[in-house]
């Protein structure tokens, strides 16, 4: 009798293992969690893969918030800039972490992409059109960013999940959103330019430019948009400038007005001549550098230094909406 009972239990265990193998593999591939955790989730939910997956996400979220609370005081000086452009909408965001190792992690890239997509949705739905204005823009601070939703959850939840996965602190530092009317195109670029997550460009530097083309848009003008982005990243101007009102700096190396700077791709020609030759006007721009002004940043208003750098741009552009912090 005992021999038969023992054999029955032994045989049942083999059958369970064989039946579970495929489901366990599917769950682990789908979620990325350990075999032990996936097995526990399946056992708790009678092999229902959907319920097991949801339980794993809840556990990871809870663990993420616990870690986030423990690590929140640690400095996040590394990270990435994310840039999204789509017709007449654009967003540029900065997400920070503790180490460059995590900044190269795919999970971190997906976090930056999620933040960019949330900002793009915000730009489309929440930035109201302005009569007579060609360009609307708004700065988002850390708290506002955390409240934006992606895939039905606040970015704060996505951030906590990231912290739980990578095991170090991370933060949503700032973002800037654009919405343009007909006649103004938005272009974006990041450097280095070899990183991307979906439609989001990633890099240590990023910029968004608002351009107005005086003639029918050509391939040359489109390429110029990318080159002007590269120039803004490399030369770091703090304003567009107005012909006849602004004066160039005495020393070209000290020039911070975009139109008077030596063009990065041809230092013998100033930017204003390049724009005139190609029938292009720079309406506005925003440049982010990962970790810039970090030593002076209290994180109470992470956009403050950047907005000060770009305040003159608003004075240069007629019909524009002032920067708004919410």
Image (cartoon, rainbow, N blue to C red):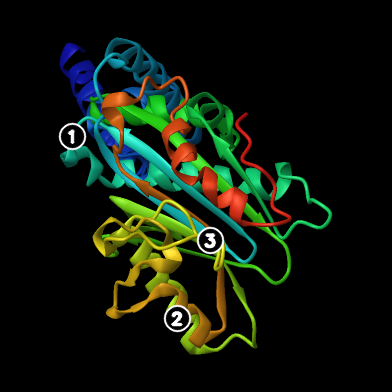
Measure how far apart labels 1 and 2 are at the Cα level.
42 Å
Residue 170 pos. (x, y %): 32, 28
Residue 313 pos. (x, y %): 54, 51
Q: Judge depth for marks 3 and 2 and give the one in front.
A: 2
Mark 3: few/some/many CA within 10 Å (<14, 14-19, 20+): many
Measure how far apart labels 3 and 2 are at the Cα level.
26 Å
Q: Residue at x 57, y 72 (%)?
A: 281
Relative height, residue 87 to residue 205 (above, below)? below
Quarter in which the N terminus is drawn:
top left
- For disc 3, the marked residue is 85
Residue 68 pos. (x, y %): 34, 17
Quarter in which the C terminus is drawn:
top right
- For disc 1, the marked residue is 99
Q: Does label 1 or label 3 sit earlier along the sequence? A: 3
Measure how far apart labels 1 and 3 are at the Cα level.
27 Å
Can residue 139 be seen in this snapshot?
yes
Q: Does label 1 or label 2 sit earlier along the sequence? A: 1
Q: Secondary structure at mark 2?
A: helix
> Foreground residue, 55 or 271?
271
Q: Give the farthest residue toward the right.
A: 131
Looking at the image, residue 111 sits to the left or right of residue 125; the answer is left
Q: Quadrant of residue 180?
A: bottom right
Which label was assigned to residue 273?
2
Mark 1: few/some/many CA within 10 Å (<14, 14-19, 20+): some
Q: Does label 3 or label 2 sit earlier along the sequence? A: 3
């Amino acid at each position: 009798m005992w021999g038969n009972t023992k054999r029955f239990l032994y045989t049942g265990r083999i059958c369970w293992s064989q039946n579970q193998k495929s489901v366990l593999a599917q769950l682990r591939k789908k979620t990325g969690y350990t075999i032990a955790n996936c097995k526990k989730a399946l056992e708790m939910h009678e092999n229902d893969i959907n319920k097991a997956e949801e339980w794993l996400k809840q556990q990871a979220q809870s663990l993420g918030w616990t870690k986030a609370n423990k690590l929140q005081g640690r400095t996040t000086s590394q990270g990435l800039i994310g840039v999204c452009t789509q017709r007449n909408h654009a967003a540029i965001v900065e997400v920070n972490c503790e180490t460059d190792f995590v900044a190269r992690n795919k999970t971190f890239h997906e976090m930056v992409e999620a933040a960019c997509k949330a900002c793009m949705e915000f730009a489309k739905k929440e930035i109201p059109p302005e009569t007579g204005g060609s360009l609307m823009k708004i700065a988002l601070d850390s708290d506002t960013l955390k409240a934006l939703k992606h895939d039905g959850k606040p970015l704060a939840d996505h951030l906590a999940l990231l912290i739980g996965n990578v095991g170090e602190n991370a933060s949503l530092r700032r973002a800037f959103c654009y919405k343009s009317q007909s006649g103004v195109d938005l272009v974006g670029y990041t450097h280095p330019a070899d990183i991307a997550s979906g439609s989001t460009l990633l890099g240590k530097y990023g910029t968004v430019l608002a351009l107005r083309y005086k003639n029918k848009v050509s391939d040359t003008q489109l390429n110029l948009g990318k080159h002007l982005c590269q120039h803004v990243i490399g030369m770091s101007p703090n304003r567009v400038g107005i012909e006849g009102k602004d004066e160039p700096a005495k020393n070209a190396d000290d020039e911070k007005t975009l139109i008077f700077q030596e063009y990065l791709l041809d230092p013998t020609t100033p930017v204003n001549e390049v724009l005139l030759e190609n029938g292009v006007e720079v309406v506005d721009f925003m440049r982010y550098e990962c970790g810039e002004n970090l030593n002076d940043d209290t994180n109470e208003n992470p956009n403050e230094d950047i907005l000060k750098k770009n305040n003159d741009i608003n004075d240069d552009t007629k019909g524009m909406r002032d920067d708004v912090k919410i």
